[in-house]
Amino acid sequence: MLVVKLISKRPQKHYFLFFCFFAEKRRILDSISGEFKAGQLTAIMGPSGAGKSTLLDVLSGYTSSGFHGRLLVNGSPRDSRTFRRQSVYIQQDASLHPQLTVSEAMNVASVLKLGRRGPEIDEVLYSLGLLEQRDTMTSSLSGGQLKRLATALELLSNPPVMFFDEPTSGLDSSTTKQCVGVLRRLARQGRTVVCTIHQPSATVFEMLDQLYLVVGGRCAYSGHTANLLPYLAGLGLRCPPYHNPADYALEVAGGEYGDFSEELVKASDNGRCVMWTTTYTAKQALPGVAGTSAATDAAGRLSRQSSSVASSSSQSEVKPGRCSRQKLTYPTTFWLQLYVLIKRTFLKGLRDRMLCHSRLYIHLVAGLLIGVLFLDIGGDAAHVFHNFSLLFFCLMFLMFTALSAMILAFPLEMPIIAREHFNRWYSLKSYFLAVTMADVPLQGVCVCVYTAVVYYMTAQPMEPLRFLQFLLICALVSFVAQSVGLLVGAAMKVEHGVIFGPLVILPFTIFSGYFVIQRDAPASMQWLFKASYLKYGLSGSMLAVYGYGRAPLERCSEDYCHFKRPDKFLHELDLDEGNYWLDAAILFAIGSVLRLGAYFVLKFRLRRFRQ
């Protein structure tokens, strides 16, 4: 049975009983139980593959399927949706946005989690020793500073329960000591702080309050760290003098002194034995911990910060003895989330100068090259088929550039989405809309630049309405291609999306009406033309340039020009009965449906990502 105590005036408990977890028909956690308490720093330790991270994923609610057992909060069945309001989970890979400064990242988190930019930001940064780095880009922070920033972002909402997966991974001994000291000070404020830790030094091990040792998916010890050696000695396992107790415990768990796993599990009753857990109160003095000057008085600063945030965070108070059943809502409204996320995404795009400038330059240079290659052919009746190829290439170019830009939108940010969405920063709907809308200005500028350059240099009809109609069709084809990119990116990993993305749009190209006219195709394949969005794009662009009563082409660079009349040329291509506005409406509908599909695929993949 696992117990987690939340911040409150009275103790509160969270249990799990005879808990098992399965993955791929393999039992990872086996009838495990335990107890965690508020005001304490509890470390989950064990050999590699013992199930530490799996246990933390399940306890935090990050993994919500594949297990059975009883999970209780304050003696009542745990409502996982409500528990997410009262806890945060900071994973080992603290993925953050590299294009933002520390201050900007904190401001975004503050608005999304509290609905405002509050004075708590400086308090938290000072407490975690990050105040001097507030104007530093996240990409320039050290590993320890990144982990502290990830903690600071979640600390703004004053969560009663905090889970950390390998918070000291990749840190040197000094930074590790500072990191664990921060976690201990957070626990002293009355929080339940649970972390997994791989192999702490003797000094770091003494800073831990409780140890939960896992061996083969079962509990080998649950109790105070000071009681670990007496517990092992009672089983005939005596730690050598001057030996790190944490190392010795891991060596025993790893079988270096023989297989004692059954004896350990039996002695701890697989986590149900609490005789080694000493009574602990948050009033105990905190031993001195080496750290930065900003961290030496952090306890008091954090205490004041916790009090100030508690008034704006309804989740910090829960009535003792029962689990809160409040409706799960986000701290801020959908529209505020959308505004903040659009602003953040747009700012990131602008600061990624390589991507931003390269997209603009590619469209400009490509437009100039195509313009020179097809110079002044738009009004020449002898080159109508060349002009037809030009219009098709314009659509193809815009389709591939839009697809490539969006196909990486989700895969690269999946760890960030998973963390922020799970910790209730925002709804998935607001994030999805923000990502899709923030790219509209840049893509719109790129389409306008390319279309204007090509249209003018190739001497297409200089009529404002025809140009705007052609521009609209190009923008809609780009819109659909972006939607395809979002769908592929939401469904596949980066390496798969880059390969299969172009293959996905290949059928649309084949049945666009450029290579084979629809009326000449076999009857059994006619429907494929109607399913190709590029067919509607090509039809709309041809109607914009040649349709709706355009006057006969006056220029003919050869002795005889068969297609001086634009309507005759459209009839040859089986486009004379087309409807421009219907083509535009169908393109918009296809793009909208694909984006809706991308949203649901992303939602499904996000669930799978957490499993």
Image: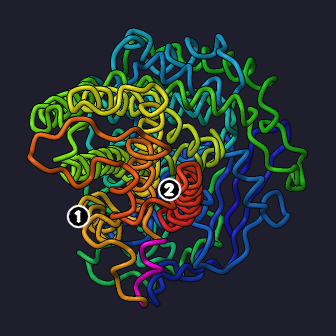
What x and y, as percent, mark residue 415?
A: 43, 50
Determine the secondary structure under disc 1. helix
Q: Quadrant of residue 45?
A: bottom left
What x and y, as percent, mark residue 286?
A: 55, 27
Asked whether residue 528 is drawn in magenta, I would say yes
Determine the secondary structure under disc 2. strand
What x and y, as percent, mark residue 281?
A: 70, 38
Nearer the observer, 26 or 269: 26
Q: Residue at x 46, y 62 (%)?
A: 230
- What span is in magenta? 524-530
Image quadrant occupied by the N terminus: bottom right
Identify the residue position indicated by label 2 in the image: 211
Above/below status of 238 relative to 265: above
Residue at the limit of the structure toward the front, as seen here: 559
Residue 300 appears in the rendering: yes
Q: Nearer the viewer, mark 1 or mark 2?
A: 1
Above/below status of 357 relative to 211: above
Mark with earlier residue (1, 2): 2
Q: Quadrant of residue 309?
A: top right
Question: Left or right: where does residue 558 sit relative to residue 520?
Answer: left
Q: Residue at x 9, y 47 (%)?
A: 559
Identify the residue position indicated by label 1 in the image: 499
Nearer the observer, 150 or 403: 403
Amino acid type, residue under disc 2 in the picture: Leu
